[in-house]
Each structure stands twice: as C-alpha cells, then as structure tokens.
Amino acid sequence: MTTAARQGSSAPYDVIVIGAGINGLGIARDAAERGLRVALVEQEDLCFGVSAWSGRLVHGGLRYLEHGDVPLVRESLKERERLFRLAPHLVKPVRLIMPFYSRNKRPSWLIRIGMLAYDVLSFDKSVAWHRILSARAVRERFTGMSAAGLSGAALFTDGQVEYAERLCVELAIAAAGAGAVIRTHERVTALVREGDRVVGVRSIDREGREHEIRASVVVNAAGPWVDRVNGGDEGGPAPRLIGGSKGSHIIVDAFPGAPTDVVYYESQSDQRLVLVIPWMGRYLIGCTDTLFDQEPDEARAEVDEIDYLLGEANTLMPEAKLTRDDILFTYSGVRPLPYVPGVPEWKIPRSHIVLDHAKKGQPGLLSIVGGKLTTYRQLAEDATDDVMRLLGRKGGTVSKEVPFPGARAADLEAFRADFLASAPVDADTAERLLDLYGVRAERVLDLVRREPELAERFDPQSPAIAAELVLAVEEEFAVTLADVFARRVLLAFEPGHGRAGVERAALIIGDRLGWDTAEREAQIAEYERWLDHLRVPAPAAR
C-alpha cells in the first residue's frame, strides 16, 4: 500500500466500496467525482478477480437478443460507444465473424434479423454496420474456417480491451485523483452494525493489523464474494444473492489458418457460442459456462473444459489440429450472476442489480449483483445515484464525459506521433508504453528523465523497462511483485510469464519498497503461486 493510498484512512466516509473489480472501481470513481468521501477496500489487488478473467471484449451483448433483453443490449451498445470515446487507447473496435453453417441450431435468417436489430439498437455508433459475406468471401477472409456446410457469415463490429487490468488501474487513478482512498490487500471480515443499520466495516490488512472503517453507506461490490462479505467471517445469516458460473479460456500461439478477426461460433456439441479471439499476439479461445460453488479464487480450467474448447476449435478450424501441447496457459473466472436455482447458467440474466438491504431490514448496505465489463459505468452511475439518495445529496454523474487518465489529450494521434519521434527509449518500448499507458506514457518517461538508469530493459524477453515497475508502486497502488507483473506491466501473460526478469524486477521494486533479501525471495515465491491461476491441468490417468 502506498502512503498516498493510506492518507485519511481514519476519517469517517460517506461511502465505503468493497471490491476493486471493474464495478467497485467504477463506483468509487463516480462517487468521488460527485464530491463524496470514498474509501475502497479490496482483499487482494485491483482487478484481481473476475474482471481479469473475461474474454476481454467490450460488446453489445448480441446473444442477449435471444433472451429478449433488448434494454440490456441497448445499454451495452451505448456504453461500448462511450468507451470507444473515453478510453480509445485501451478499448478499440474489432471485427467479428459469425459463420452460417447448415448444422447450426440458429438458422442464417435468424442471425440476419439479429444483426439488423443490433445495428438499429446502435444507431448512434461510430463504427461500421454489419455486412453479410458469401461463403467464398468468408473463406478468403478466414482461410482456416471449415467449408463443410458453410453458406456465408455475418461480419460486424464490437470492441476489445486487450488489457482489462489497465482499464481497472486507470479507474483507480481517476478515483484517487478525485479524492478516494484506495486500500488494497485488506480483507473485510465483518460489517459494522449499530442496531440494524450498517455503519462500516471491519478489516484486516496484509500485515495482520485490524481496522474499523465507518461510513454512512456501504456498497458491497465484491463480485463472487458478495455473499461471504454479507455473512462475514462468522458466516452470519444472509440471503444468497450470487450463483457463480465459471468461464474458462485457453491461450495458444498462432496456428495454420488462424483468423485475423474475432470468430463468434456456435458450438456443435451444445449450441453455446464459442469465441476465437486474437489477443496480445496469440489467441484466446473460450469460454465455458458451468456452475461453480467453491471459493472463487480456486477456479481453474479443468480437463473436460479444455477438451471441449479444443474440440470446438478443431471443428471450426480443421487444419489447426490444436492439442493440449499447444496450450500456453489457461485462465478461469467466476461470474457473479444472480442466484437463480434451476435455471441453466447460460440463461441467467446478465443485467445488474443494485440491492438496497433496507428492504431486508439492514439500512445502510447496498449489494451489487451481476453486471458485466461493458456496462460497468452505467452500473456505477446507478449505484452512486442510490448512494446519493440515501445520503440526501444531489448531483449527477460526470463519468459520461470525462476521459480516462490515459486519454486526456486534445489530439491522441498527434500525441502518439510526437511521443514516438522523441521518446528516449527503443522504438518497441515506446510502442509498448503507448499501448499500455496512453498519454500516461509520459509519466514513465518522466521517471527515466529523472533517473536515466530506469530505462533498463530488466527482462531480456520484453521491451518493458524499469521505470514501469517504479510507476506501478509509486502511482498505481501496486504492493507486491504479483501486483506488478500480473496487473500493471502484464508480463504474466507473455511467454515465460516474465520469469527471465523476475529477480531483477524484485531488486528494482524492493529498492523502492524496502524489501530485504528474504522479502524479495518471498515475493518471487508468492508470484509463482499466483501463476497457478494459469496452469494447464494434466490429463486424467487412464
């Protein structure tokens, strides 16, 4: 925890937000920008949970049309367009292909109607409308696609955020810039009550110190941990709100016939929709959708999920011939969907709920159920509106118009050109800095100008430089080596997971945070344990 993040931690707050996923961070930012005194408390790190384990698409929810959830689709499309405008360095348009196969459950005429509805609902968008491609045009565009039964495809546009972690980091920076206090690695152990009213939280930090933080309103945005927070460590009575659903992905290198677009494909085994997504120079294939009632952080890709994804990928792309040996790593996350017993996971609504517990006799507590990355900002606005109502305060959101910190330039293209022409680092490093930090890449260079040795490329396999490590702990709320590698500089998702530079990085970070040799070794060991999230499970013994 940085000193700045601890400032004001003993003060009473208007609102405490529990959870630093995309939703909690969005709420903290919105509330702080409306002038509320905000504390955000997170048991691990920014973007530690499900926000990091999605398919990293910012989409309008085409498949929600199947369930008739037109309002959610319209909301998603509006928020997608807003992110194109407010975070263009991180959220970018991407083309998707949805093939028409004779074996599909969804006939091509139905998909065509869905495409028209999708375009009509996004009438105010800045990206191209859909096109229908012939079978020949599809095969020319995507050479590896199976031709058997193919009659054409729909080509349409959605959004992609390759670095979802960086989106969360910038929300935290914006929230802190508006006055919010960010407290990471501090687990909420109980809600503080006076009578029936919730008036704060008890927590325990990484060093084992206990805290009591008070506020007029507490917002539980802990995602799949919502029920545990409401019940506390004592497991007190609390109605079940979350019915977690696990989604797993596999990551592979480029393969023969690989697409250049995202492919949105109807599974041949169960009619779910499977995605093949170009991501960070590799391919992300997912995802599954299975009930998961265990500790959310224990979610890992399982053998049957891997077999399912490989089978579907090879059916779509026969010449790929992907096997388990081609998988570089996997990841899994637990969606915080509403608890709806008896309803299949894929049919559970994806719209969000801001639950006011006053209706259950617990005033002062709001819980966030559901939601998705694309619509996090609307969720945050809705939740903060409720907080303002409970506080008797007035004032609307400004989050609809204020760019993310990395996009605050009058002309981003001009900034990019000037940066590439003048940056005192190698060209590949300069490109990397722009991709991850946007205009905040200048903050990295400010460190290099102050301390030229921070231009060091500490990992021989990456263009990342030492100044990024320093920025992570000085300005981006990173506390551990895993925080830095997995959710700031993102070397965890590169070949070798950054292991070639991890010892040098531990020295550089340790110099800033006062780590001795034992602590550096402990940090490296902790990072190795975190890498288990990315494991490829061994096949079952026969």
Image (spheres, rainbow, N blue to C red):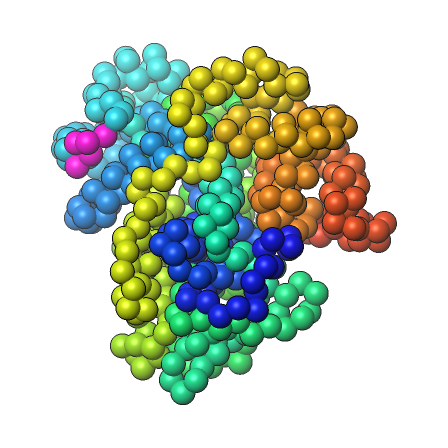
Residue in the picture at 59% in, 21% down: 430
Residue 405: give x, y in percent of width and height: 46, 37
In the rendered image, the residue lying farthest to the bottom is 195
Identify the main secondary structure in magenta: loop
Residue in the picture at 32% in, 69% down: 391
Count how many numbered circles sit on residues in the image.
Answer: 0
Answer yes or no: is residue 178 visible. yes
| Residue 328 left/right relative to 401 | right
Residue nearest the viewer, comparing 376 with 115: 376
Residue 79: within the magenta?
A: no
Residue 518: give x, y in percent of width and height: 84, 53
Answer yes or no: is residue 293 visible. no
| Residue 3 left/right relative to 223 | right
Residue nearest the viewer, comparing 220 with 475: 475
- In which quarter of the view is residue 492 placed? top right
Residue 122: within the magenta?
A: yes
Residue nearest the viewer, comparing 127 with 217: 217
Residue in the picture at 29% in, 34% down: 81
Residue 367: give x, y in percent of width and height: 37, 66
Residue 506: give x, y in percent of width and height: 76, 42
| Residue 256 left/right relative to 476 | left
Residue in the picture at 55% in, 16% down: 420
Is 142 placed above or below 197 here? above
- In which quarter of the view is residue 495 placed? top right
Span colored in magenta: 121-125
| Quadrant that contains the N terminus | bottom right
